[in-house]
Image (tube, rainbow, N blue to C red):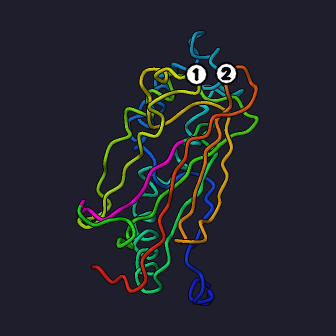
Amino acid sequence: RLNGLSPSVRHLVIFLGVPIVYPRLTYIEKTLSGIKSMGLTKLSFIAKQKSLVNIWGEPELSDDMNDHWTSSVHMEERKVFILRLQEFARTRNVRVTFVAGDVHCCGAGRFASANPALPPERDYRFMPQIISSAIMNIPPPNMVIRAVHAGAKTYELDRFTDEKMYRLFELDVNGRSPPNNNTKMLARRNFSSYVEDLENHSMIVNIHVQNENNQGTKAYPVTISALAPGNNVV
């Protein structure tokens, strides 16, 4: 179906249910599995944490972890998917961008060539991702964001491609450092907007994060450059 796109298409935006550029959750999966196997969900403290234990006494986050692209059970499938999109971007000179949600926080990241000297406009492996959710749902507990943030490192997809989350939130909406200095993921209600720059065909994204007093939002911008015509860097 992608090969049937008009030659005039310069930017392909792929909407995913969950983020594909995201911190590794392996150790969280193991922790939740341990909580279940040792029967710790029956402890009163853990049982009262509704974000951790569901009505059946099972770890609430376990199913969510398995659904993630970065879960160990999906890593090979994820790699094949990205490599196919890289080839599409290279042969068609189309920028690929991901938009995802479902994690009840916001952030941004990217895949890119491992060569740091290669600018995004010449890099078909450069595939940014915007994470924006949710408008109504309550953000996850701070300890969950801290655990996820701890896994937000630079990873290698293959020897040509690496991936990382951006430090987009150096300041929180209140002008102070975010909780626990979690600069890559912000646990606040949010939504995002997308506008094309008609002069250079870049896409200007703003993640609009709700203010503390629930009145208005603060915008965190991300500019996604178009892929230069004639790009064929391998």
* Residue beneath disc 1: 174
- For badge 1, the amino acid type reads Asn
Quadrant into which the N terminus falls: bottom right
* Residue stretch rendered in magenta on the structure: 107-116
Count of marks, rendered view: 2
Left or right: 151, with 199 as reference point = left
Q: Residues within 10 Å of mark 2 (few under 14, many from 20)?
A: few
Quick check: is 113 in the magenta stretch? yes
Residue 207 percent coordinates (x, y) = 61, 44
Up the image or down, 229 lies above or below 53; here it is: below
Residue 36, numbered circle: none
- For badge 2, the amino acid type reads Glu
Q: Main secondary structure of the magenta part?
A: strand
Left or right: 117, with 221 as reference point = left
Up the image or down, 225 lies above or below 54; here it is: below
Left or right: 232, with 6 as reference point = left
Q: Of helix, strand and loop, which one carries label 1?
A: loop
Label located before the other in sequence (1 or 2): 1
Residue 150: image quadrant is top left
Most distant residue in the top direction: 44
* Residue beneath disc 2: 212
- Residue at the (41%, 46%) spot, across then down: 165
Most distant residue in the front direction: 199
Residue 50 percent coordinates (x, y) = 66, 22
Q: Residues within 10 Å of mark 1 (few under 14, many from 20)?
A: few
188 vs 16, nearest the viewer: 188
Asked if the residues shown at circle 1 and circle 2 are in contact, with their CB atoms under 8 angstroms apart, the answer is: yes
Residue 19 percent coordinates (x, y) = 54, 51
Residue 136 percent coordinates (x, y) = 76, 35
- Residue at the (42%, 56%) spot, across then down: 110
- Residue at the (39%, 70%) spot, across then down: 121
